[in-house]
Image: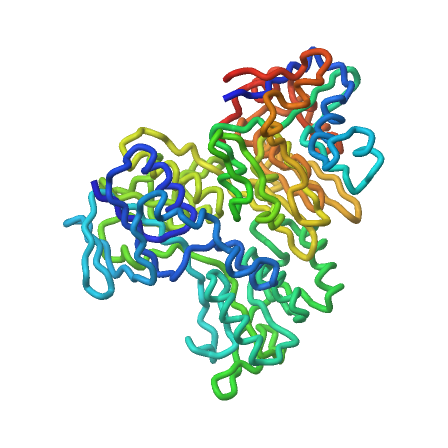
């Protein structure tokens, strides 16, 4: 399957990946509408790390032996037929087992609503995820693994 | 090939998935004393009314059909015949097997208490769906405004969460000086104790129940070790669980606390395997065999057992204790060794706290071996990763507790290996 590979040396810290991730997962899919409306603004599926000039964006690695799906108490976290790790909010009870076991720390909790807040879905249905498409410097690329 | 699995929960399900990957024809028979399959940790959510009966499962509705397995529900296994490779049911029927996987889980420890009978009304354990059902039925028929919970460990606190949601005040009695004593320290416990007080409830530490008083076989009060009497018409017994070894008593399967298994999840008898809360497998941190009765360990052991049952040589590299519990609205995650012997100079403890959160990291010889995270669980799994990878943190341990803790804190080579890799097997 195709996987997102990150090159921190190329990351310029523009955070466009986050901007496009958020708007892609909003209802309107429109950047301006998404960022003007707090109701239509999902949490980004990307964890952005920054320390001085070193920056990089990290999203779900869709692990082969995914610890999050194994640890999930309700099977809210599951793999689809294409080996993509997805999250079903309906089933999620907010036990945070996935947060405990994800070695990349990329799952974000919504502590108020007791649900996993966001998780990269590899922009399911799109040929190329928006974070990859809009990265200006090829710091995030899609590779066949 | 005929595979028989005793017990039907997370270890069994994971084993089945692997077995079917390699053997689509072999017969798989599962025997369970339960009348349904459900996610055990969800019973506290069910008690609290946060999850409905139909959402308490954790597998697809067509799992049995999809994986072509036969499940015998509400069926009790009497004994395993290790000589003739068969199991004997309570109705004297026998089922033969080529490979057997034992996943009988744990059962609650019930202490001998003066006045407590097997059938005393108002007294419950809290490990099964039927326990939650029985508690709910009792609450319908009786007015319960206050309950006593014996045991402030994980099961006791999960029961507490459920009951507090029903506006029942609690007195939680524990022999130790803190809640969740296996994973929490005194400071971590304080955050929960404060919350209990807010809900008109109380933690009674370093104490236990010595007597149960009944009227018409129904509980009316308990007497503590310090002679104090607490009036109550409900008692939850939650002092712990032990591996359920009933069916292998008087067999030649080797046990200690649980069934002893090697790295292939195999018992001392060829063709007989064990996994989950009943198994005593490798503990990554102590390098001994221990029972680690948690969901992710059961899942992983089930998988490894599955591989080896179909003849694939996959080794279990050991896991360590870890828990994620949200109690009284406070999320917490803990890993490994959280209460080291402070006199031992190999250990070093780092911590950071304010009134809302608490973080503690335990180092042993410059490697992280444990952590407690209270109300600050973001990116928790990275701590698990560096425990597992035995990363030397001597150069940057000061950054481990910072708000921006993440991969950038870790050495470049280490993080590149992980974040650019193919994902990892954990």
Q: Is residue B198 visible?
A: yes
Which one is in front, A63 or A100? A63
Please, is residue B112 above or below residue B373 in the view? below
Quarter of the rendering containing residue B167:
bottom right
Q: How is the image coloured?
A: rainbow
Counting from the top left corner in percent of width and height, residue B254 is at 28, 47
Q: Quick check: B80 left or right of B46?
A: left
Which one is in front, A22 or B186? A22
Counting from the top left corner in percent of width and height, residue B263 is at 35, 35
Residue at the location (34% across, 34% down)? B21
Residue at the location (53% across, 30% down)? A84
Residue at the location (62% across, 57% down)? B179
Q: Quick check: B333 left or right of B264?
A: right
Q: Is residue B175 visible?
A: no
Residue at the location (59% across, 30% down)? A124
Counting from the top left corner in percent of width and height, residue A141 is at 62, 15
Please, is residue B297 above or below residue B326 in the view? above
Counting from the top left corner in percent of width and height, residue A69 is at 51, 39
Quadrant location, the N terminus of chain B: top left
Report how many numbered discs are placed on residues in the image: 0
Q: Quick check: A16 left or right of B124?
A: right
Q: Residue furthest right?
A: A36
Q: Residue furthest bottom?
A: B216
Which one is in front, A34 or B231? A34
């Amino acid at each position: 399957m195709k996987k997102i590979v990150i090159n921190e040396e190329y990351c310029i810290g523009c955070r466009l990946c986050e901007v496009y991730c958020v708007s892609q997962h909003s209802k309107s899919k429109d950047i301006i509408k998404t960022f003007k409306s707090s109701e239509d603004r999902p949490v980004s599926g990307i964890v952005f790390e920054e320390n001085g000039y070193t920056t990089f964006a990290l999203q779900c690695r869709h692990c082969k032996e995914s610890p999050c799906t194994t640890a999930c108490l309700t099977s809210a976290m599951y793999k689809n037929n294409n080996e993509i790790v997805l999250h079903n909010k309906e089933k999620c009870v907010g036990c945070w087992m996935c947060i405990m076991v994800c070695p990349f720390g990329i799952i974000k909790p919504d502590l108020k609503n007791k649900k996993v807040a966001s998780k990269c879905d590899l922009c399911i249905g799109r040929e190329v995820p928006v974070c990859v498409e809009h990265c200006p410097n090829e710091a995030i690329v899609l590779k066949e693994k | 090939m005929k595979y028989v699995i005793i017990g039907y929960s997370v270890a069994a399900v994971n084993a089945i998935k692997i077995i079917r990957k390699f053997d689509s024809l072999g017969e798989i028979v599962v025997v369970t004393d339960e009348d349904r399959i459900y996610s055990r940790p969800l019973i506290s959510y069910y008690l609290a009314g946060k999850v409905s009966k139909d959402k308490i499962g954790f597998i697809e509705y067509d799992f049995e059909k999809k994986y072509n397995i036969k499940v015998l529900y509400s069926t009790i296994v009497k004994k395993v015949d290790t000589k003739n490779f068969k199991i004997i049911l309570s109705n004297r029927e026998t089922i033969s097997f080529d490979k057997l996987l034992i996943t009988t889980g744990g059962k609650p420890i019930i202490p001998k208490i003066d006045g407590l009978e097997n059938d005393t009304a108002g007294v419950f354990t809290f490990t099964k769906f039927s326990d939650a059902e029985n508690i709910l039925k009792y609450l319908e028929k009786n007015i319960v405004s206050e309950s006593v919970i014996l045991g402030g460990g994980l099961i006791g606190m999960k029961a507490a969460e459920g009951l507090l949601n029903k506006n029942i005040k609690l007195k939680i009695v524990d022999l130790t000086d803190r809640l969740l004593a296996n994973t929490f320290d005194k400071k971590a416990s304080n955050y929960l104790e404060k919350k209990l007080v807010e809900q008109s409830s109380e933690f009674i530490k370093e104490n236990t129940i010595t007597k149960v008083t009944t009227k018409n076989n129904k509980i009316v009060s308990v007497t503590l070790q310090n002679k104090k009497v607490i009036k109550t018409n409900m008692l939850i017994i939650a002092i712990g669980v032990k591996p359920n070894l009933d069916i292998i008593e008087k067999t030649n399967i080797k046990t200690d606390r649980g069934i002893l298994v090697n790295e292939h999840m195999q018992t001392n008898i060829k063709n007989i395997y064990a996994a989950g809360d009943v198994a005593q497998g490798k503990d990554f941190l102590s390098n001994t065999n221990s029972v680690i009765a948690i969901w992710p360990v059961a899942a992983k052991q089930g998988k490894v057992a599955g591989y080896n049952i179909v003849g694939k040589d996959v080794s279990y590299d050991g896991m360590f204790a870890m828990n994620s519990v949200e109690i009284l609205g406070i999320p917490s995650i803990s890993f490994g060794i959280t209460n080291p012997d402070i006199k031992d100079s190999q250990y070093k403890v780092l911590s950071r706290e304010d009134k809302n959160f608490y973080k503690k990291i335990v180092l042993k010889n410059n490697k992280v071996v444990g952590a407690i995270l209270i109300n600050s669980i973001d990116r928790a799994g990275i701590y698990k990763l560096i425990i597992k990878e035995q990363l030397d943190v001597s150069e940057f341990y000061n950054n481990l507790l910072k708000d921006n803790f993440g991969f950038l804190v870790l050495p470049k080579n280490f993080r590149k290996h992980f974040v650019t890799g193919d994902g990892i097997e954990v």
